Image (cartoon, rainbow, N blue to C red):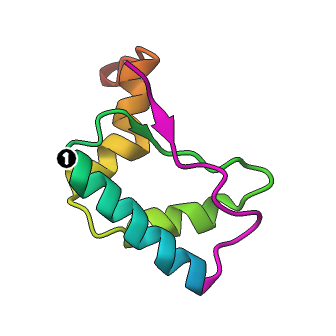
């Protein structure tokens, strides 16, 4: 079993053209794979802008359940973080 993230896509902020390209690529990959159970959110901060990546995540045409898996649930499971106590 392995996990992957999609950090390191840009330095700084996404350009409109590259954001559109990566949005299509990630949506296609996730659709093909089905459940993004092993995909993690990442930014490579501080060389990439966190707000730019979060905006990118919001724009992905995916169900909210899949976005939550990518944004935090998969990482909580991987690192065995009991979020019920937070």
Give the left or right position of residue 23, taking residue 14 as reference. Answer: left
Q: Is residue 35 visible in this depiction of the protein?
A: yes
Q: Is residue 51 magenta?
A: no
Task: Write the start and end of the magenta stretch as one range.
Answer: 1-16
Residue 12 is situated, as x and y percent measured from the top left of the image, at 76, 66
SS state under label 1? loop
Q: Is residue 86 visible in this depiction of the protein?
A: no
Badge 1: how crowded within 10 Å, few (<14), some, or many (20+)?
few
Residue 44 is situated, as x and y percent measured from the top left of the image, at 70, 47
User: Is residue 82 positioned above or below 8 on the image?
Assistant: above
Camera-nearest residue between 45 and 29: 29
Residue 58 is situated, as x and y percent measured from the top left of the image, at 40, 67
Q: Residue at x 28, y 70 (%)?
A: 61
Q: Residue at x 36, y 68 (%)?
A: 60
Q: Is residue 4 magenta?
A: yes
Q: How many marks?
A: 1
Task: Give the position of the C terminus as an image quadrant.
Answer: top left
Task: Give the position of the N terminus as an image quadrant.
Answer: top left
Q: Residue at x 21, y 49 (%)?
A: 65
User: Is residue 21 positioned above or below 30 on the image?
Assistant: below
Magenta segment's dominant SS is loop
Residue 9 is situated, as x and y percent measured from the top left of the image, at 63, 58
């Amino acid at each position: 079993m392995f996990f992957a993230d999609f950090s390191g896509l840009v330095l700084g902020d996404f350009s409109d053209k590259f954001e559109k390209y990566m949005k299509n690529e990630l949506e296609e990959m996730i659709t093909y794979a089905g459940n993004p159970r092993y995909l993690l959110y990442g930014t490579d901060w501080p060389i990439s802008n966190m707000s730019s990546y979060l905006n990118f995540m919001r724009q992905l045409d995916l169900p909210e359940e899949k976005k939550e898996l990518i944004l935090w649930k998969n990482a909580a499971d991987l690192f065995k973080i009991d979020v019920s106590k937070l």
